Image (tube, helix red, strand yellow):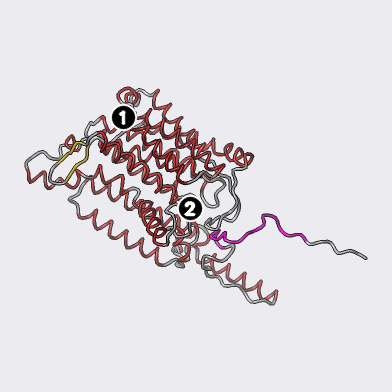
Amino acid sequence: MREYLLTLCVTVAVTYLLTGPVRKFAIAAGAMPEIRARDVHREPTPRLGGIAMFGGLCAGLLVADHLRNLNGVFELSNEPRALLSGAALIWLVGVLDDKFEIDALIKLGAQMISAGVMVMQGLTILFIPVPGIGTVSLTQWQGNLLTVALVVITINAVNFVDGLDGLAAGMVCIAATAFFLYAYRIWFGYGIEAAAPATLFAAILMGMCLGFLPHNMHPARIFMGDSGSMLIGLVLAAAAISISGQVDPDALALFAGGERNATHAMLPAYIPLLLPLTIIAIPMADLILAIVRRTWKGQSPFAADRGHLHHRLLELGHSHSRAVLIMYFWSGLIAFGTVAYSVNSASMWIVLAIAALSAVGLTLLLLPRFTPRAPRWAERLVPPRYRHAARAAEAAAEAAAADASGTEPEPVGPIAAGVSGVNGATAIGPRSRFPERRKAESAR
């Protein structure tokens, strides 16, 4: 665990320190596209954040290769080299897209080629568990096609959800954390060495996202762009493929003890196959809804619009930060709930806790204008906007200023999203970056 934590810290530090110079390079290179109708930010923001994230990936793999215990991952498996090869290819295509706006079909082809590069080096699905049968070995073509499909779906799911500041990096970080806990349990608890590459990939992915998040939180100073979103999507898919298609469920000793015990333990046996899907459940749902919505309207599935889940949250009245936190909450609930259920599927407390947290999440989702207030004794521990006294003083100051100026005070409550200048949630109309200057009147 110490070596995994060291790899994580190095990846975080390298990604964080590289993001500042990369931002300056992106501005100098002109990788600052104009604001589009579907964007929610208000000012042109540089892209190419994926350059720093790729640097963190390389640094994490390099450090792990020189550690005593993690070095065995590189000696016994070719999966780290396969990941680096596919990541380098998809990252290069993403950098070109951030600068020159590559066609969607070209990017799709590049994603398939990147997945094929990893398959050629051994990172592929070998077998899957089937209910009532057990472990079923796949032919070479079946495994290769299933691997390519999973990589392409995961990359596009992460790419589709990258629409708000800090959203994609935070959700993938949550998913990677849950995945790391499960993979580490498989590797350390059961002594299965085949789970070590997936554990390493998850730790490095956590570091990439954590190092980039301070620069990407609202208001973002830099975007990861396609070079970053496709990169972290590929790393997440590689970790899922490694532990789903390389680790035999029979090795977990789930089917020992007769047919009754085998039937009772059947559901946890599918966790290695289901967990990669559950940790990206929110991006996957967004991807499926976007494809259905666009094809129903007669548009291309790759046509951009403002109908994603995060756009719907803004339309409900949630602020930018609140919408991101709600997406974080649901991602964490699904990912960590699945991991907890895989550890002890017979515990009803886990099911009740998930149901209770789901009710809390629905309450927060349906009450966008509800602002929680901290109790009196805890007001010093929370931001000023959650304090009773600060809110009352703010309202009194606005009322006094309105009386002095002779104008009516503005409403204190939140304003619905869609109004220009509110919460950074609109960028539909053109907006000048510089204030208008009045012409000096001539003395003549």
Residue position marked by numbered label 1 in the rendering: 122
Q: Mark 1: which amino acid?
A: Gly
Q: Mark 2: which amino acid?
A: Gly
Question: Residue 352 at what x, y percent from top left?
Answer: 24, 58
Vertical arrangement, residue 98 with respect to residue 400, above or below: above
Q: Quadrant of residue 189?
A: top left
| 215 sits to left or right of 280 | right
Question: Residue 236 at what x, y percent from top left?
Answer: 37, 41
Observer-side mark, 2 or 1, equals 1
Q: Which residues are magenta?
A: 422-437
Tag count in the figure? 2
Vertical arrangement, residue 374 with respect to residue 218, above or below: below
Vertical arrangement, residue 244 with respect to residue 408, above or below: above
- Residue 297 colored magenta? no
- Residue 434 colored magenta? yes
Which residue is farthest right? 444
The 10 Å Cα crowd at callout 1, few under 14, some 14 to 19, many 20 or more, is some
**Which quadrant does the C terminus fall into?**
bottom right
Q: Which type of secondary structure does the marked residue at label 2 adopt?
A: loop
Residue position marked by numbered label 2 in the rendering: 163
Question: Residue 440 at what x, y percent from top left?
Answer: 84, 61
Q: Residue at x 63, y 59 (%)?
A: 430
